[in-house]
């Protein structure tokens, strides 16, 4: 069950003009709760002017092996007008305490032998940095190819950390950088990393059919283009893992379906249940939140997956879903923040 705790900021490292890495201290009694897999994220919560805001940020530090982590490091990039990221870049200082949710997310790679690859754009490097560094340190029989796309060298997050991996694992780590707004002295010509370019580039870089897992992370357009390129090259959907960081409004069609005039949701959360009427137009998450303030969520935008619940009975329609894989929706999971009742009664289980 996701919970918030106050963690102290132990370091603020500026990565680029518009991004920082925050290191958080985890006191010994909370360490087990913050044990995480490589690729998971943390939701941070802040209340300002009476309004609560939450944002999820990926953990970039390697996942713990053996002992639970004593620190956690997350990457934060400034989003124009972003309430939390502006605060993080301009105000958060050493010694501050932040409200931090326990780790969540299924964009993960537990270390295993094999060949893996990632295609990332911008801040999409953050979870992949944790994935690669954990994998290469713990699994001598694993190889990783990282293809990253950024605007310029100066705007590239975790430049040093990635260069360090290249020095440490020259045989097993391959790095390919594409800059959209700057020519590089060596390497690939500048330009966008879109579907067409990837379709030509990938077979020249690595044996695509031998890759056991592909990790795509970044803005919606890049992830969608990379998925189409991989599918076009014959890669099975089950080998592709995705995490989308930003979705522009209007990117995905909103599904509409007739809603019943009166409906109720029954929800089980942290072992306790309740049944409440759903107000017209509100999401099932909002209905549950009006009655149970501890319902898990972060983005409320269908992106982070924190509000995932099992649909025990009834039917819902989801406005959009950028978080759940098709196997999860087929198994009966929904995003509560995007779900609206189609039947008069709906039953959700947040504990499953
Ligand atoms: S809260 Fe992020 S997907 Fe629902």
Image (cartoon, rainbow, N blue to C red):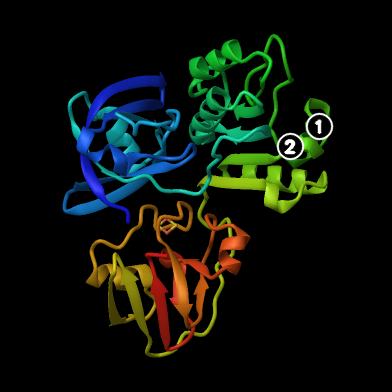
Circle 1 SS class: loop
Q: Quadrant of residue 80?
A: top left
Q: Which mark is residue 211?
A: 2
- Rate crowding at label 2 as few (under 14), some (14 to 19) or many (20 or more) other CA atoms within 10 Å: some
317 lies left or right of 67: right
Q: Which mark is residue 207?
A: 1
Residue 193 drawn above or below residue 236: above
For this orientation, the residue located farthest to the front is: 66
Q: Position of residue 120 (x, y in %)?
A: 60, 34
Give the camera-side residue of 248 and 344: 344
77 lies left or right of 110: left
Q: CA distance from mark 2 to mark 1?
A: 7 Å
Residue at (28, 30) in percent of width and height: 24
Q: Quadrant of residue 337?
A: bottom left
The answer to whether any part of residue 189 appears in the image is yes
Residue at (67, 20) in percent of width and height: 172
The quarter in which the N terminus is drawn is bottom left
The quarter in which the C terminus is drawn is bottom left
Q: Quadrant of residue 279?
A: bottom left
Ligand 1 sits in which quadrant? bottom left
Residue 75 drawn above or below residue 236: above
- Rate crowding at label 1 as few (under 14), some (14 to 19) or many (20 or more) other CA atoms within 10 Å: few
Give the camera-side residue of 339 and 36: 36
Q: Tell me how many marks there are.
A: 2
Circle 2 SS class: loop
The answer to whether any part of residue 283 appears in the image is no
Q: Is mark 1 within 8 Å of ligand 1?
A: no
The answer to whether mark 2 and mark 1 are in CB contact below 8 A is yes
Q: Position of residue 210 (x, y in %)?
A: 78, 36
Q: Position of residue 69 (x, y in %)?
A: 34, 31
Residue at (50, 14) in percent of width and height: 160
83 lies left or right of 121: left
């Amino acid at each position: 069950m996701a919970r918030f705790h106050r963690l102290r900021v132990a370091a603020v490292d500026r990565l680029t003009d518009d991004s920082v890495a925050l290191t958080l201290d985890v006191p010994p009694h909370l360490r087990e709760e913050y044990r995480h897999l490589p690729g998971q994220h943390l939701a941070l919560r802040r209340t300002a002017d009476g309004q609560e805001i939450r944002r999820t940020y990926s953990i970039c530090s390697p996942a713990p092996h053996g002992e639970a982590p004593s620190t956690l490091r997350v990457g934060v990039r400034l989003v124009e007008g972003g309430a939390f990221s502006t605060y993080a870049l301009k105000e958060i200082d050493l010694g501050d305490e932040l409200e931090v949710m326990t780790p969540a997310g299924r964009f993960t790679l537990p270390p295993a032998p094999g060949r893996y690859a990632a295609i990332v754009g911008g801040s999409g490097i953050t979870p992949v940095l944790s994935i690669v560094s954990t994998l290469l340190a713990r699994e001598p029989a694993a190889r990783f190819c990282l293809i990253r796309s950024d605007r310029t060298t100066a705007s590239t997050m975790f430049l040093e950390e990635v260069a360090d991996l290249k020095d440490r694992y020259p045989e097993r780590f391959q790095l390919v950088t594409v800059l959209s707004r700057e020519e590089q002295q060596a390497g690939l010509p500048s330009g966008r990393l879109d579907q067409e370019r990837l379709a030509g580039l990938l077979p020249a870089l690595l044996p695509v059919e031998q890759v056991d897992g592909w990790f795509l992370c970044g803005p919606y357009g890049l992830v969608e283009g990379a998925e189409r390129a991989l599918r076009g090259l014959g890669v099975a959907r089950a080998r592709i893992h995705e995490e989308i960081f930003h979705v522009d409004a209007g990117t995905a069609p909103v599904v509409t379906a007739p809603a019943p005039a009166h409906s109720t949701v029954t929800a089980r959360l942290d072992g306790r249940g309740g049944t409440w009427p759903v107000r017209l137009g509100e999401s099932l998450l909002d209905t549950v939140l009006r009655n149970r303030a501890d319902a898990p969520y972060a983005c409320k935008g269908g992106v982070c997956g924190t509000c995932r619940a099992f649909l025990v009975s009834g039917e819902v329609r989801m406005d959009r879903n950028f978080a759940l894989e098709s196997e999860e929706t087929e198994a009966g999971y929904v995003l509560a923040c995007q779900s609206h009742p189609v039947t008069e009664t709906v039953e959700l289980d947040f504990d499953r």
